[in-house]
Structure formats: C-alpha cells, structure tokens
Image: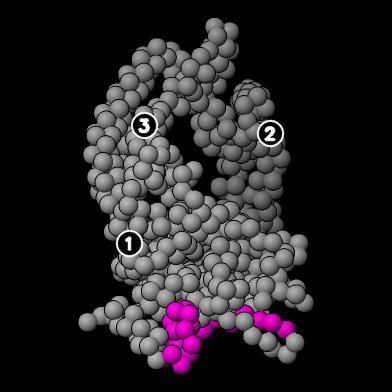
Amino acid sequence: MLESLYIRNLVLVPQLQLEFGAGLLAVTGETGAGKSLVLGALRLLSGGRAAASLIRRGAETCEVSGFFHFGEEHPALSRWLDQRLEALSLPPREEGRLLLRRVITPSGSRAFINGAPVTAALLKEFGEALIDIHGPNESHSLLAPARQLHLLDLFCTDTPLREEVRQEWGTLISLKKELQALREEALSPEEQELLSHQLQEIQEAALSPGEEEALLARHRVAANAARLQTLAGMLSQGLSQGENSLVDLLAPWIRQAEELARLDPEEGEGFLQRLDTLSQEMGELGVELGEYGASRELDQEALQEMEQRIDRIQKLKRRYGPTLQDVLDRAQRLQERLRRASNRKEELDRLTDALQTAERRHGEICQRLHLRRRQGAEELSQAITRQLQHLGFQKALFQARLSPAPPGPEGADSLEFLFAPNQGEPMAPLRQAASSGEVARVMLAIKTVLSQVDDLPVLLFDEIDANIGGRTASTVAQELHALGKEHQVFSITHLPVIAAAADHQYLVEKCLEGERTVTRVRLLSPQERVEELTRMLGANPEDAAAKAHAQELLRSFSPR
C-alpha cells in the first residue's frame, strides 16, 4: 500500500506530508478546494505527463514522492519488484519499502526509484504496477486487452497453464532462430572449398598451445651458440681451469686456515671446512661450464629448421591471429562449421522435426487454456453483470468475449470486455461504450469481482459518485468498503455515504497564508468527520438532525 506521500510546490501546495493507512480512504472537501490533489500526485508517480505549469508560482521545482510497502499480502508483486530491481541494478527494497519520486523543472522532469535516477518510462512501468487510477480521461489498465486476458487467467486460477504456454512458446522461438541461422549458414561449393583449405593449412602445421614461446627460447640459444661457448670458456678458466684461477688463488688461504684449525680446533675446523667446500664447488662449477661450452656447438641445420617453424607460425598468425591461440580457436570454429555443413541436411531435418513437435505441443496447451478461458469468461461475464446491476445498471450487460488470435506467448486467444449500459443497445468494447460518468462504476464492478486475484494494490476512484444517489450510492459505498479489505482504495467523493464508508477520511481545503492561497490536506478525527459529513449533507453545522444522520452513517460502517 501507499504508506506516505510527500508533495512540494505542486500548484497550490507549498509543502505537504501525508501518512495513509489501509482500507478505504475518502478524500472530501468543498468544490474547487483541490480534492484531485492526491489524484494528480499519484498520476505523476505513475509516469503521467509532467507539465511545467504544475510548479507553484515562484518556485523553481516541484517534487512528489511516495513510499510504498508490500509484504506477504502481495507475494507475486513483491517477487516481481525484487527481481525487476535486481535486473535493472537498482537499489533493493529495504524492509519491503519502495520509493518512487518525481522532480519537475521548467525544462522537463527527473524520475527516481529508491533514490536512483531512472527514465520516465521505467517510472511508468513501476507506477502502473502499483497504482490503478479510475476516473474521467484516465487510461485504465483494465481497458487494455492484454491486461483483461491476464485477469481472466487469474480468475480461472490457470496461471500455471499460462506459464506453460509461455515456456513452450520460448522453446518454439528458440528452435525457429536456430533453424533460420542454419539455413543462412548454407555454404556454396567455393565457400566450402575455401574453409577446408584454411582448416587444412592450420591442421598441417600441427600447432600446440605454448609452442611459440618455447620455440623462441630454443632459437635464441641456438643463434647465440658461439657467444655462449666463449662466455662459458672464460668462466671455466677463471674459476678452475686456467692459471691464476680462483681455485689456485684460494690455495694459500686454505693453508692458513689449516694452521688456524691446528691452533684452535674448536672454531678453526669450521672455517677450514667452509673454505674447502668453496674450493671444491668452484672446481666443479668450472668443469661444468667447460662441458656446457663444449656442447654449445652451432647446429646450422637445427637453427634453420627452427627459423622455418617460427616463420610458419608468424604467417598463420597474420592470417588467422593475431595470437597463436586465436589460430587454434579459428581451426576449431572452421571444423565445427564444416561439420555442420556436411551434416546440414540431417541437422535441418532434426530441427524441423523439433519445431513441428514444439508447435504441436504449443497448440495443444493453447487449446487446453482456451477451453478453460471460455468457461471462465462465461463465469466472469455473469458475475460482473450481476455486480453492475447491483451498482445501479439494472439493464446493463457485460461480456468477456474471447476471439481467436495468432499463437503467441499468451496463447491463441484475445479478450475484449464488452459493455451495454442500457437495454436494447448493442454490446461495444468497454473503452468505447462507457461514458466518463459510468466508467468508474464499471471499473468498481470489475475490481470487486476480481478483488481476490487482481494484484494491483492501490486503487483510486475519481467521480465514482457522478450521477448516482439513493440506494445506488449506498450500494457503491458498501462495495468500496468491501474492496478496501483487499486493496488500498482512494475515493475522491462528494457523497456523504461514500465518505462515511471510509476507514479514514481526509479533508482538502483552501486557505490564505499571507497573501497567497494554499491547499491543505489533513486526516479528520472522528468528531471532525461528523462535522464534514454534516456539511456534505448540505446542512447547517449546528443542525442536530443532520449531525445525528452523519453519526448514524458512520456507525453503519463501523465494525460491530
């Protein structure tokens, strides 16, 4: 439900913070007081047109924000909100709350969800999933055939079957795309020959991952064989093989260490052993370097083979690279494409059979869904017709008419709500047949019948009391009160019986602040409700009989 609404600089409102409860909420006030203020604010949060004329005179910007809270009473909506927020990388809900915000400037508007900037279209998507506005010149969600079909499925409690249709359609579309891609991949003889040549060229090279790095390292050694021999010989001579080598130079120092060890065996023996070890290691290292140098003879044939191999790899990289791994990947793709081409007929047959199976399966599920929808449409038509008659349309007829439609993710049906308000008039689409004074009452009838399955949490009815009175007004009040048990319902009304049916009543009034007219909205106390209902009855504030009537109206809707 809508927990709170904040408004700043909207037309005649400098600043306003409203807290709302559950159930039916009546918005009342004198004609011209600005009762449609709440309607206008919710329309903005639903992505409605944000005109610069809405900004209060003298202000630079206008702002409207609403906190919505959903818990276990709307599990499907809560799941959808959380999944959509995550998919869009928007901040998640905290403690089940969602914040919608709209800021209007002279040059345009900005929209926010949970504090993050979004497009107006995205705000509209979220707003219309939360708020349903019914009044003159509104674009009702229930007038959209797609929404009508969705509600029929909910009424039929066949959501799983509808989901099965959608999943089968997804499979069907995927097979169609795969089949189309395979058809477009058909290779001409020239193309097949070219791809085969490219694959053969790569395969004949017998490449392996990491080969290039190892080959370049070996080539560097082979190409520098003469220099390596020279360096190894010089090191070997200097360490142990030549005159004045380090081993020879170390001999006198070893003799002195021997004397040291004789004089101080405890400490000197360790020094002597370390010098002996050092001399032996230098001797061994000198020998190894000599052997290494002797083995570094230039193998011109091996060097030439390595250079040829490197050149071949470089050519393949230029053609299919830029890296060796790219060349290997290219070979794999060529092999797969040629495989598909060679098995194309078998693959086409397989995909064609799979597509036909999916189409048949989708058609069978669509037929099952159609039969259930047809039965549900009859039940829904009868229930809404009875409800319309209950609301004062004594001769009205309503029909949820199913028609064949091209197969798709929602099945193979289209639905149109048809309405004839008076006897003898032909049935016509609801969006055409109902006048602005009738449409809100028709929507109330539909919402009442669908109250258990309609997942829109916030409903707003404007001018639902147009051209009604007496028993019909009382009936409308009772139905709004009952609808408030399943949804949060706002009703902008002039009728005292509808205001009395509300769980909470808000008064809209104009007043002067300095030399400026401002609009205020406040929640009425029980005593203030009696006074406001007395005014709505057209009586003097001190009229005892009118006050008693107002109190009786309130008592008639109070829980017993």
The numbered mark, 1 or 2, whose residue comes first in the sequence reads 1
Quadrant for residue 37, please give it: bottom right
Callout in the foreground (2, 3): 3
The residue type indicated by label 3 comes to Ser
The residue lying at 57 percent from left, 29 percent from top is: 327
- The residue segment tinted magenta is 516-543
Location of the N terminus by quadrant is bottom left
Q: Secondary structure at mark 1?
A: helix
The residue lying at 65 percent from left, 24 percent from top is: 319
Q: Secondary structure at mark 3?
A: strand
Q: Pinpoint residue 36: horizontal percent, then vertical percent.
A: 56, 69
Tell me if I can see residue 452 in this picture: yes
Q: Pinpoint residue 310: horizontal percent, then vertical percent.
A: 64, 28
The numbered mark, 1 or 3, whose residue comes first in the sequence reads 1
385, above or below 484, in the image: above
The residue nearer to you, when weighing 330 against 58, is: 58
138, above or below 503, in the image: above
Tell me if I can see residue 203 in this picture: no
- Residue named by callout 3: 403
The residue lying at 64 percent from left, 85 percent from top is: 511
Quadrant for residue 371, please give it: top left
Q: CA distance from mark 1 to mark 2?
A: 74 Å
Q: Pinpoint residue 472: horizontal percent, then vertical percent.
A: 35, 63
Q: Which mark is residue 223?
A: 2
The numbered mark, 2 or 3, whose residue comes first in the sequence reads 2
- Residue named by callout 1: 75
The residue type indicated by label 1 comes to Pro
